Image (cartoon, rainbow, N blue to C red):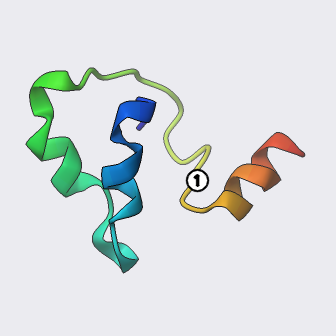
Amino acid sequence: MLFSSSYIQELLTLKGQEGARKLILHYLDDTDSIPFEQGRWDIDTPEDYKKLINS
């Protein structure tokens, strides 16, 4: 799932394993599906992102 930067503050309030599902469901009309290989990337933290861009 990719998010617009306009949702960053709400994403930053998510705790633990809560995930973004609540946010996605709340803004369902603002979402669109972009298919890509499942499980290829899972970026939940700044460290995950750094690993991706340095790979």
Height in image: 31 above or below 11?
A: above
Q: Nearer the viewer, residue 41 or 19?
A: 19
Between 42 and 25, the residue placed more toward the observer is 25
Rendering quarter of residue 30: top left
Q: Is residue 40 left or right of residue 12?
A: right
Residue 2 visible in this rendered orientation of the protein:
no
Graded by Cα atoms within 10 Å as few (under 14), some (14 to 19) or many (20 or more), the crowding at tag 1 reads few
Which quadrant does the C terminus fall into? top right
Res 53 → quadrant: top right
- From the viewer's perspective, tell me whether residue 44 is left or right of residue 29: right
In depth, the one of 51 and 6 nearer the eye is 6
Image spot of residue 17 (x, y percent):
36, 75
Q: Residue at x 41, y 60 (%)?
A: 12
Residue occupying the far right of the picture: 54
On screen, residue 42 versus residue 19, left or right, reads: right
Of residues 35 and 46, the one nearer the viewer is 46
Q: Vertical placement of 18 versus 35: above or below? A: below
Q: Give the secondary structure at mark 1.
A: loop
Q: Quadrant of the N terminus?
A: top left
Quadrant of residue 48 in the image?
bottom right
One can see residue 44 in this view: yes
Residue visible at 89% across and 45% down in the picture: 54
Residue displayed at 50% across by 27% down = 36
Q: Position of residue 13 (x, y in %)?
A: 33, 65
Pointer 1 residue? 43
For the point 35% across and 75% down, which residue is it?
A: 15
* Residue 25 x %, y %: 12, 44
Q: Amino acid at mark 1?
A: Ile
